[in-house]
Amino acid sequence: MSFSPLIRQLIDALRGLPGVGPKTAQRMALNLLERDRNAARHLAQALELAMDGVGYCKQCRMLSETDICSLCSDPRRDDSLICILQSPADVWAIEQAGGYNGLYFVLKGQLSPIDGRGPNEIGIPALLDALDGRQVTEAILATNPTVEGEATAHYIASLLKPRGIKVSRLAHGIPLGGELEFIDGGTLAHALAGRTLVN
């Protein structure tokens, strides 16, 4: 038995979400249609409002309902420190962890020539423009610890160091509470390379 065109369209739309496969999309669609149509209508309305009302901050490129987001407009934040990340989700992760009080710049992904994403596509020119108007003393590169993320961090570092900006990278290594015997080799290698002195 095949689904009707409208149900199939809903399933296909849900499959566009990250991590949602065909069975999960089917289960979600049927649940929305069978169980609580008011909740489904509320979801549709919230999606429409978000699509129309959420854009990007003109300074850091974070998702925002205003031209300048609440982080960039907060006078208590240290504007000499900038953390460069790959996505708005990364900003929320840093904010939830606490301990960072600087500003951000959100790239649109990472360098990947094979996928057609070069410096212009991820926003490197916009980053350099954003730095031109500020007295930034340190840039923290918080790209993912993948081959592409490392290449992106290295490329950005090569552009920022000649500007006299101290460039640092998020530490990679053993998670708090982790046991060495269960840590993969790549993580151990990063931890050894990034070791710090004990005072």
Image (cartoon, rainbow, N blue to C red):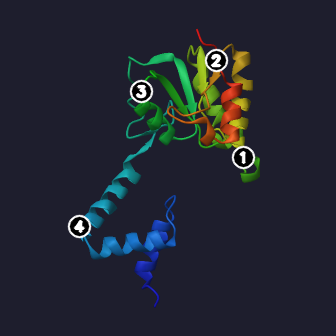
Q: Residue furthest bottom?
A: 1
State the CA–CA distance, disc 1 to disc 2: 31 Å
Closest to the camera, between mark 4 and mark 2, is: 2
For label 1, count other residues whose C-alpha is less than 10 Å away and answer few (under 14), some (14-19) or many (20+): some
State the CA–CA distance, disc 1 to disc 3: 30 Å
Q: Position of residue 132 (x, y in %)?
A: 61, 20
User: What residue lies at 49% left-to-right and 17% top-to-bottom?
Assistant: 79
User: What kind of residue is marked 1?
Assistant: Ser
Which disc, if any, is residue 55?
none
* Residue 164: quadrant of the picture: top right
Q: Residue furthest top?
A: 199
User: What kind of residue is marked 2?
Assistant: Thr
State the CA–CA distance, disc 4 to disc 1: 42 Å
Q: Which residue is mark 3?
A: 98
State the CA–CA distance, disc 3 to disc 4: 37 Å
Query: Which circle's residue, 4 or 2, is located before the other in the chain?
Result: 4
User: What residue lies at 72% left-to-right and 52% top-to-bottom?
Assistant: 115
State the CA–CA distance, disc 4 to disc 2: 55 Å
Query: Which circle's residue, 4 or 1, is located before the other in the chain?
Result: 4
Q: Secondary structure at mark 1?
A: loop
Q: Secondary structure at mark 2?
A: loop
Q: Is residue 13 left or right of residue 83?
A: left
User: What residue lies at 49% left-to-right and 60% top-to-bottom?
Assistant: 17
Closest to the camera, between mark 1 and mark 2, is: 2
